[in-house]
Image (tube, grey):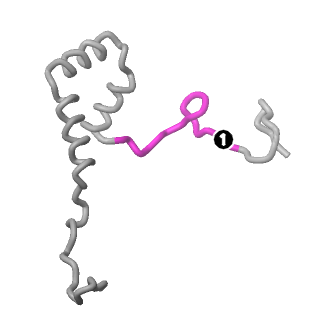
Amino acid sequence: MPRLFDGTTPGPGRPKGSLNKATKEIKDFWEGFYGSPTYLKSAKARILKGRAPHLEAYWLKRLFGEKSELEVTGPEGRPLGVMFGGRYRPDGSHR
């Protein structure tokens, strides 16, 4: 551990994960802004009018989590064929 000029060791410092003063002030400001009744009313109106698709997606992801699976099927629900380094042929043949 480093020592100060007088031979003592410095204090423990800021706890791990804690925010510095400027970051905390900025976070507090935006939490107040986004939590204000005026903003929430505006956001609700935009979502209901379909003018805030990204905001709606953000809140859905926050509330219900992100789906990590994606199922892709081909025609008639059959598995989708994937070919790397070739040409697609409608008859299904390949070289």
Dot 1 falls on a residue whose secondary structure is loop
The foreground one among 12 and 82 is: 12
Estimate the x, y position of residue 43 in percent, counting from the top left: 26, 19
View extreme (bottom): residue: 7
Estimate the x, y position of residue 57 in percent, counting from the top left: 35, 29
Name above or below for residue 94 compared with residue 60: below
The foreground one among 60 and 19 is: 19
Give the magenta part as a residue range. 66-82
Residue annotated with mark 1: 81
View extreme (left): residue: 37
Residue 94: in magenta span: no
Name above or below for residue 67 compared with residue 10: above
* Snapshot quadrant of residue 53: top left
Image position of 80 (left or right of 64): right
View extreme (front): residue: 6
Residue at 60%, 33% in the rendered image: 74
Q: Determine the main secondary structure of the stretch shown in magenta.
A: loop
Residue at 24%, 36% in the rendered image: 63
